[in-house]
Image (cartoon, helix red, strand yellow):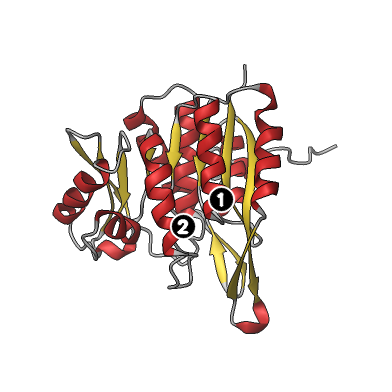
Amino acid sequence: MIKKVLTVAGSDSSGGAGIQADLKTFEEYGTFGFSALTSIVTMDPDEGWSHTVTPIEPALVEKQLKTIFAGGPLDAMKTGMLGTIEAIEITRGYIDNYKMSNIVIDPVMACKGTNELLQPENVAAMTRLLLPTATITTPNLVEAGILSGIGELTSVEQMKDAAKKIIELGPKNVVIKGGHRLKTDRAVDLFYDGSTFTVFEDELFSTDYNHGAGCTFAAAVTAGLAKGYPVIDAVALAKKFVSTAIKNGQKINPFLGHVWHGAYNHAEDRMGKKEE
């Protein structure tokens, strides 16, 4: 039986992050993806690629989830950008009603390429309503600094302090993504299960073609959980999956490049035209 996996997140019209990244990743993991859109993100090439976030009406989010859950509980789910407090409340209702497990909360707080924090009240609602349901949450360095209340994180020791504080918010596990902001020569992520820290290190790729890496990582963890991987193993595999996707990032337009979601499985070789 193919595992069923849900993403409740925003749509990235450029195709690299959000539900586009999630569904591509779910497919690469051999799972069947569902999506409920909470917002639509557009970018204007005439205005220096400026971002506009348009929330979806909560009633329409509700209709999407009602459709998706018509067949009963799913094997795993993740949340990303959540457009309104009402959408957060509706999502929590479905988690409770269907007793969902294998829940990944990616606490998206801003669009990549912008410094604008999404509505602080949305972040507060996500923290209060969704983090306590999480099997794991996957903040980046900035998000972890905000969730923990510590602020800017510049070392692994500070990441450990932040992870302890984030666990107190209710998730069973947390993985903090170091990324380029950590100023190390390796790609460092920190996993914490409430008792033990595990540091994941990999090659750090100097590339600007990494749009969608965070969403892809969270989606990969979600699909791994759906397929039965223990949490730490799902994280380890997701790290390899995303590392390969970043290494093979593709230029999409004059403004940015995306991770290549199919890199780990060499998807570019599929369905090639056979010679006569």
Tell me: residue 67, above or below residue 98: below
Dot 1, crowdedness within 10 Å: few (<14), some or many (≥20)?
some
Q: Secondary structure at mark 1?
A: helix
Tell me: residue 33, above or below residue 54: above
Quarter of the rendering occupied by the N terminus: top right
Quarter of image, res 205: bottom left
Is 165 placed left or right of 250 in the picture? Answer: left
Please report whichever mark, 1 or 2, sits nearer to the chain's N-terminal start. Answer: 1
- Pinpoint residue 104: horizontal percent, then vertical percent: 44, 38
Q: Residue at x 59, y 82 (%)?
A: 48
Q: Are marks 1 and 2 in contact (CB under 8 Å)?
A: no
Q: Amino acid at mark 1?
A: Glu
Quarter of image, res 221: top left
The residue labelled by disc 1 is 86
Q: Secondary structure at mark 2?
A: helix
Quarter of image, res 132: top left
Is 274 placed left or right of 10 in the picture? Answer: right
Query: Residue at the right extreme?
Result: 276
**Viewer-closest of 216 and 114:** 114
Q: Residue at x 29, y 43 (%)?
A: 169
The residue labelled by disc 2 is 122
Query: Residue at the left extreme?
Result: 157
Is 90 placed left or right of 159 in the picture? Answer: right
Dot 2, crowdedness within 10 Å: few (<14), some or many (≥20)?
some
The Cα atoms of the two marked residues, 1 and 2, are separated by 9 Å
- Pinpoint residue 239: horizontal percent, then vertical percent: 38, 42
Q: Residue at x 17, y 34 (%)?
A: 196
Q: Residue at x 45, y 45 (%)?
A: 217
